[in-house]
Image: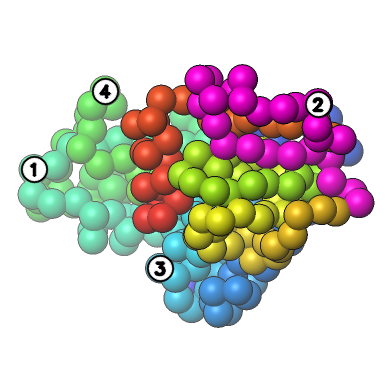
Amino acid sequence: MSKILARYSEIGLKSTPIRRRFENQLRENAVAMLMEDGVEAIVNRQGSRLFVESEDTDRAVASLRKVFGIASLSVAEETTSKMEDMCALAAEYSRSRLSEGQTFAVRARREGSQGYTSMDVGREVGSAIFIANEDRHVRVDLTDPQVIFYVEVRDNHSFIFSDYIRCHAGLPVGSQGKVLARVDDDRGLVSAWLMMKRGCRVIVSGSADWSPLKQYDPLLREGTEHRQALGYVLGTDLEGLDSVDVASYNLPVFFPTVGMKDDEVQELVDVILNGL
């Protein structure tokens, strides 16, 4: 069974205690999203990665792409960290991904004490792929290859994959407290979404359809007040800022889209509705 590798980005900049808390929140959110979408999966955290196993890889990937905090995903094949096992798997894996005359390269990285370097992995795995596809007249091109094979070695395991699937990144929802968001138009929708991306748990209200936000947080709630709320979120542009009476609010007010043009807001609306 293939494994899905889920990576984060800025979480790695946090101090160790904060990073661990954010990693646990990210795992909880991933599990909640998979459950909400009806995808059976096992989610484990090891080091700076989440490893997800599911019989339905495509649905699991589609579900995980909505989880804020995940920067990218890769569907990988797993084997041991023994060089001969990596070479054997890479040779088999490459047969379904290289075509006649294509160029390729291997990008390797490792963590642990395996007795070899990342350069050794790149060289040996690259040789195995070349030999396995010699009948197709493939060539090595380290500068501008048509196909890239990635190898991650982690302690006693290694993972081979050929794609990075871009996700929303940001911070895990629930890691930055609660805010009250007013959604009366597209700017309000985008503003609430951007605060979710920054890790806030949003309590939403308003006259516009805010239901698309629920796909990014199964725990999204409707309401106009909450005793633990840290602030209000409003959607407005720079011209409309003067009409907002900030003094009438008893909490800080955030304007995530105040510096955005209408076309930038529309681009994010399309992302919210249709995904990446």
Q: Earlier in the sequence, mark 1 or mark 3?
A: 3
Residue 162 is left or right of residue 8, and the answer is left
The amino acid sitting under disc 4 is: Thr
Q: Are marks 2 and 1 in contact (CB under 8 Å)?
A: no
User: Magenta segment, which residues?
Assistant: 227-250
Query: Which residue does the numbered mark 2 point to in the structure image?
Result: 247
Q: Residue at x 68, y 39 (%)?
A: 233
Residue under circle 1? 101
Earlier sequence position, callout 4 versus callout 2: 4
Tell me, yes or no, if residue 155 can be seen here: no
**Horizontal placement of 44 versus 191: left or right?**
right
The answer to whether residue 134 shows anywhere in this view is yes
Alpha carbon separation for disc pair 1 and 3: 29 Å
Residue neighbourhood size for the residue with mark 4, other residues' Cα within 10 Å, grouped as few (<14), some (14–19), many (≥20): few
Judged left or right of residue 96, residue 191 is right
Looking at the rendered structure, which numbered label has been put on residue 143?
Answer: 4
Residue 227 image position (x, y, % from top left): 91, 51
Q: Secondary structure at mark 3?
A: helix
